[in-house]
Amino acid sequence: MNKRVLRQIGLALALLFGLSAGADAADKIKTVASFSILGDMVRQVGGDRVEVVTLVGADGDAHVFSPTPADAKTMAGAQVFFVNGLGFEGWMVRLEKSSGFKGKTVVASKGVKPLTLSEEEGHHHGEEAKVDNGQEEHTTGEGHDDEAEDVIDPHAWQDLANSKLYVANIRDGLIAADPDGRAVYEANAAKYLDEIAKEEIAVKQALTTLPEQRRKIITSHDAFGYFGAAYGLEIIAPEGVSTESEASAQDVAKIIRQIKKEKIPAVFLENVTDHRLLDQIARETGAKIGGTLYSDALSESDGPAPTYIDMFRHNIATLTAALSS
Ligand code: ZN
């Protein structure tokens, strides 16, 4: 072989490898998910066609997140931005604007029937609340202006039935951004919906064994309203639906009285919140600490809740172990 032929082969090989290596990253649909639980869902539906960057990572608290310049840069290059909506990401609109994001925002909770929490009474309602596109935080007025305003509970992913809507919205958002991938997204979503449906059955079966008088638990912030409504547990939390507001001394005293009076068996820590308040409540009431529930974020990949479905499995195992005996 002469030098010229060798050079041509070399050039051809370089082009071949260069193109295929470049094609991999360049061809993927660039997406950003606001928090880790949603990031996992987007990965399940998007598969190999999609690159997913998660803004609030494992064990992170999306309520109090503040985006960095690096996050803004990621957003600027993204084609789709997946958010939970329902007021969860209070920082989202500012980030979209300041980053110069030009893609499409998909509100994963679209279609969910939102629960509202009366901050005054401290319990959940299923009454209709108007939510346009997940960015509207206020409920429709119920005519009682003198009372504390109801707030929309954003933690809709804690009901597996709602996650089916999330998956459908993610699938449709990806198809809109990448019509060539329709068949892949539809197949991935169908497979994932099947896994979710199986998990739903497993969750309901596991919880039917719990005695009625042990179906009341304490967590630090009010992240399990949808979970409680779906699976028949009453969840009481000293903090509200956001971790932004701290529990007042009165709130804590009220919960301590309630635990003693109603003999509430266990308090549960959360992976995204500080333990000290619940440690104190457990000490003062004698309630046991039932373990750590994953509320607003997944664990690292080597932890007990690296995916959304793993998170449910871990939470159910933790709850049933603490409450059945
Ligand atoms: Zn939360």
Image: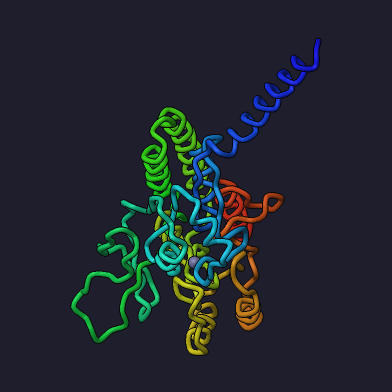
Residue farthest to the left, as pictured: 143
The residue shown at (62%, 52%) is 305
What is the x, y in percent for residue 213? 49, 64
90 to 180, vertically: above or below: below
Left or right, 12 with respect to 143, comes to: right
Quadrant that contains the N terminus? top right
- Is residue 103 visible to the viewer in this orientation of the structure? yes
209 to 275, vertically: above or below: above
The residue shown at (45%, 66%) is 98
- Is residue 295 visible to the viewer in this orientation of the structure? no
293 to 307, vertically: above or below: below
What is the x, y in percent for residue 164? 40, 44
Front-most of residues 8 and 95: 8
152 to 206, vertically: above or below: below
Task: Classify residue 143 by image quadrant.
Answer: bottom left
Residue farthest to the bottom, as pictured: 249
Left or right, 219 with respect to 98, comes to: right
Q: How is the image coloured?
A: rainbow
The residue shown at (43%, 57%) is 101
What is the x, y in percent for residue 173? 38, 43
Question: Number of numbered discs present?
Answer: 0
Residue farthest to the top, as pictured: 1
Front-most of residues 126 and 52: 52
What is the x, y in percent for residue 204? 47, 47
The residue shown at (46%, 30%) is 184
Quadrant that contains the C terminus? bottom right
Task: Classify residue 186 by image quadrant.
Answer: top left
